[in-house]
Amino acid sequence: MPPGVVCNLPEQQKPIEALWDRLSAASPEEVADRAAVGYDAPKAAYRVPLCGGEVWVAPGDRRADGMAGYEATLLAVQYLLTAQAERPAGEWVNPTSLPYGDFFFRGPHPMPTDGLEEAFGARLDAFCAAAEALGGRAVEMGDAAYEFQALPRVPVIVILWVADDEFPARARFLLDKWAHHHLPLDALWVLCRVLAKRLIAMATRGVE
């Protein structure tokens, strides 16, 4: 397995008990500073902003509140463990350009663009409204594009080209070139999945 690829993929449902053990043993002050998150001492919980929502992570209780689901819990715990005390590089890259990204982001792990293309390929206004509702900042790429602070140290850009008479709809993710410093590749893939799901949910039935 290449460096930067950790087998915590959601479909494997690998127990995250070892991650909880590590986080429980870590210094809250060090974790909060490194990951740029808040820590509520009375609650003994970290507040992790995630894709326009938030997850409260309580290592002592091995509990995550707020955004529901295995993927959100996995992302929040993994991020608290692996985020580094460094700012984004400010240079956007295709995820396949990250170290070992060309190996990882293919086959069973393509970037999750299909759902975005289906949901928004003929609905540019709906994409823009959903993106802005999740705190996205418009950037000049494609027919529309938004930058999201998906995690405190991991920004993500989503670009959309709507369908026309010649070409089908197309979506693309861009990551900061140091994104892999903060999350392993499989967790970056899950992060993009969660962001895509929340955009689609916002446009169709609202976001939790």
Image (cartoon, grey):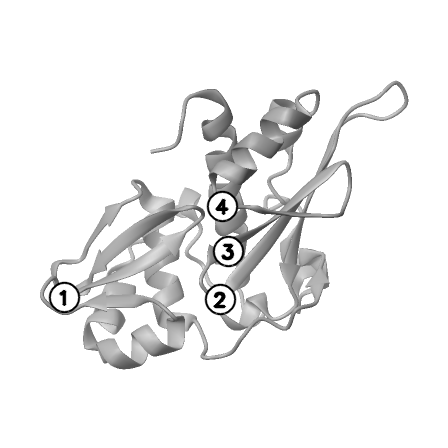
Circle 1 — which element?
loop
Residue furthest right in the image = 166
Residue 85: quadrant of the picture? bottom left
Q: Which is more toward the observer, 14 or 81?
A: 81
Q: Is residue 110 visible?
A: yes
Q: Nearer the viewer, mark 4 or mark 1?
A: 4
Circle 3 — which element?
strand
* Disc with the residue nearer the chain's start (3 vs 4): 4
Q: Horizontal and vertical percent for residue 54?
A: 33, 50
Determine which residue is flagged by label 2.
153
Q: How many marks?
A: 4
* Disc with the residue nearer the chain's start (4 vs 2): 4
The numbered disc on residue 1 is none
Q: Gap in Å between the C-alphas at discs 1 and 2? A: 22 Å
Determine which residue is flagged by label 4.
135
Q: Gap in Å between the C-alphas at discs 3 and 1? A: 24 Å
Q: Nearer the viewer, mark 3 or mark 1?
A: 3
| Mark 2 surroundings within 10 Å by alpha-carbon count, few (fewer than 14), some (14 through 19), many (20 or more) | many
Q: Horizontal and vertical percent for residue 118?
A: 64, 24
Which residue is located at x 48 percent, y 21 percent?
A: 204
Determine which residue is flagged by label 3.
149
* Disc with the residue nearer the chain's start (1 vs 2): 1
Which residue is located at x 53 percent, y 56 percent?
A: 188
Q: Gap in Å between the C-alphas at discs 3 and 4? A: 8 Å
